Amino acid sequence: MTPTMQPPVKILAVDDIAANLTALEALLAKPGVEIVQANSGAQALEVLLDHDFALAILDVHMPEMDGFELAELMRGSKRTSHIPILFLTAAGEDSQRAFRGYATGAVDFLFKPIDARVLSAKVDVFVQLAQQKLQLAEQLEAAQQLLKTNEMLMAVLAHDLRTPLSAIIASASFLGRFGGEEKIRPATDRIARSGQRMARMVDQLLHVARLHGGRVELMPQDEDLRAICAAIVDECEASRGQPCMTLDTTGDTRVRVDGGLIAQVLQNLVGNAMQHGDASMPIAVRVDGTARDHVVMSVTNGGVIDAATLPHIFDAFRSGPGRAAPSGNSEGLGLGLYITRELVVLHGGTVEAVSSPERGLTTFTVTLPRECCSAQRAIRA
């Protein structure tokens, strides 16, 4: 990628003596630096309206409006309050004047006659800082544009893939029911499962793009975690075709959360347990609402995650390998747990995984504040 040409770093020089301005121009002008001159405080205020400056070099002794008064006016404006100020004065070192100068926002004082090397070195620091700021701004803009492009790509991908995937799944279902030949059923079932898995992958990629783009917003409402968990448990058991889970709740399970996103959190955790856990052991879903300010939701399954994998279990694109589970199934993109963590953090909660080789169990525990909006305000504060 060809780097873009950065605009010159502008420095404001204010002095009522033209020879001093000419000397500053000769000393400080160089490629990438532009010196903008003003011969009075009033003219400086006009120039400040038209340009963005990395540094202002102000002479203290000027008629009508001295450097201190100009600095105070600059500090009082939102547009110019951030500009560093370097004072030049012909007066001897006076602690009272220096104190007034620093109080108006000066970063330094230089006393005339000015040492050209000292002035040049100090100005170079602010020029470098301004150039770095411009580079960071360009990088931020490029990153934001990349995120928008990525999200748009994922949206197009999801839209374009959903239609043929739906046709594949529907066709497999039709052949399974009306194909008339039992020997083709394994093939149609396999097509249906593969199509559904691909559809989940597309949804996960789209969701990750939205998370990275900051476009997933909470819509909190009063919800009952017990009802959400019961619905997910019933749905997952229906998909498996047999009872394979237990649901246990205690205390007050009412919370104010985004019910759809929390349902996705539980769906991801239960789906992870069904895919990677020991199929011979039931999955235990528990909701503990005995605490006053938070509710704890956990999913426990048979099988163990090894110690090397456990610290990275919520990283994106981590799936399957490293789990000592009988199923040995490692299908998927490894985005489910990553999305789970991001959605829980969005609510101001936490999620952790604990795996016990002694008991042969793995537990994922989600802790949610009862008021997710309050938690978000606390995080921003």
Image (cartoon, rainbow, N blue to C red):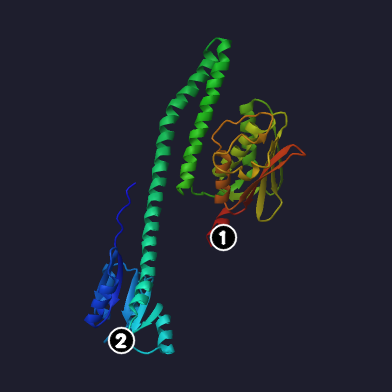
**In the depicted structure, whether residue 86 falls above or below residue 264:** below
**Could you tell whether 86 is left or right of 275 in the image?**
left
| Residue 45 visible from this viewpoint | no
Which is nearer the eye, 113 or 63? Answer: 113
* Residue 187 placement (x, y as % from top left): 55, 17
The residue furthest left is: 18
Q: Give the residue at x 45% y 23%.
A: 167
Q: Mark 1 or 2, which is nearer the eye?
A: 2
Amino acid type, mark 2: His
Q: Which mark is residue 378?
A: 1
Local SS, label 1: helix
Q: Mark 2, residues whose alpha carbon is within 10 Å: few (<14), some, or many (≥20)? A: some
| Residue 3 visible from this viewpoint | yes
Q: CA distance from mark 1 to mark 2?
A: 49 Å
Q: Which residue is mark 2?
A: 61
* Residue 77 placement (x, y as % from top left): 35, 73
**Could you tell whether 24 is left or right of 279 in the image?**
left
| Quadrant assignment, res 224 | top right
* Residue 270 placement (x, y as % from top left): 63, 36
